[in-house]
Amino acid sequence: MVNSCTGKMGHATAEAVVRAGLPFVPYSFTGSSEAVAVGNVGVSGIPVELVAPAERQSAMERLKAQFPGLIIIDFTLPSAVNDNARFYAASGVPFVMGTTGGDREALIRDVEAAGVSAVIAPQMGKQVVAFQATMALMAENFPGAFAGYRLEVTESHQRSKVDISGTAKAVVESFRQLGIPFSEAGIRRVRDARTQVSMGVPQAHLGGHAFHTYRLVSPDESVAFEFKHNVCGREIYAEGTVDAALFLAAKVAQGGPPRIYNMVDVLREGAMR
Ligand SMILES: NC(=O)c1ccc[n+]([C@@H]2O[C@H](COP(=O)([O-])OP(=O)(O)OC[C@H]3O[C@@H](n4cnc5c(N)ncnc54)[C@H](O)[C@@H]3O)[C@@H](O)[C@H]2O)c1
Ligand SMILES: O=C(O)C1=N[C@H](C(=O)O)CCC1
């Protein structure tokens, strides 16, 4: 089940679920205004019934009975992430949380306390996850290697993105361990089309892109490193999310204690196609 199919990522992911030939639940929890205004949406020709927040409790009971082994995928909004995760966890339904932002520490705490398995990650794209894992490995192996360096971080996304890149925040954590004090407030956030075009974002992808640049400069400016990951469109995340859902379903089927996984866990197990 994908929440919310009315959103850009939710819709792209729902299409990827159908493309993969997986059983697709034709219901989607959504924001109250969309449920009223839109009513229903179509995903690859399948009509999907939208469920408003006020109806989600009773709908969840029905869905759990109707779809044993239910896995929820959440791409909603930073303002909804904590409440949604608490709701899924309290309902005992394992879930993949791709939504960024919110209170991330509370998110982990709540899900752990409820004892439900989940994959929670701000980045679902296989190659970007591999880059993230590489930075984390470098930090683990060579802590402080970049002490004294200056870090500049720029992220550009479609205008509708409300929060700072969750991926940039995660990567910055590795740079901190490499010796560079850097606060999230220092991340340069680009949302205007003119700047984006000047940065090389294709016109056709102004409505869906994620460009990231991390630049490290030595104290005397004689040495510079630049890491970039530039994504156009959303397919890379949608496909990675399907991998995460399959991984989670397999973990739940195996039994064992509930656990919170991230996408590096999924990648490490070779579970990304
Ligand atoms: N993890 C990843 O790889 C990845 C990739 C892309 C986007 N994202 C994240 O996914 C999220 C969604 O991005 P988007 O571009 O699809 O946004 P969007 O604005 O297009 O869609 C958000 C949707 O959430 C719905 N919504 C709002 N409140 C809700 C609630 N309480 N319950 C259910 N649905 C609700 C809205 O109706 C809307 O359709 C963002 O946090 C974004 O950063 C993550
Ligand atoms: O389009 C978005 O929104 C994205 N959000 C994630 C983030 O914040 O890191 C992943 C990239 C795309």
Image: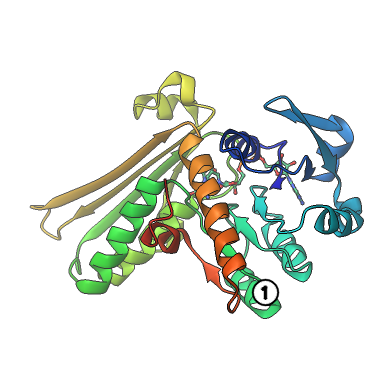
Image quarter of residue 95: bottom right
Q: Residue furthest left?
A: 222
Picture coordinates of residue 214, whole percent (x, y): 30, 49
Q: Residue 138 vs residue 184: left or right? A: left
**Viewer-proximal residue, 97 or 143?**
97
Q: Amino acid at mark 1?
A: Asp
**Viewer-proximal residue, 204 or 153?**
204
Would you say the beta carbon of the disc 1 residue lies within 8 angstroms of ligand 1?
Answer: no
Picture coordinates of residue 162, whole percent (x, y): 60, 45
Question: For numbered disc 1, what is the local secondary structure?
Answer: helix
Residue 252 sits above or below residue 222 on the image: below
Residue beneath disc 1:
110
**Viewer-proximal residue, 92 or 186?**
92
| The C terminus sits in image quarter | top left
Q: Residue at x 66, y 63 (%)?
A: 94
Q: Residue at x 61, y 69 (%)?
A: 117
Picture coordinates of residue 140, whole percent (x, y): 27, 73
**Viewer-proximal residue, 59 or 101?**
59
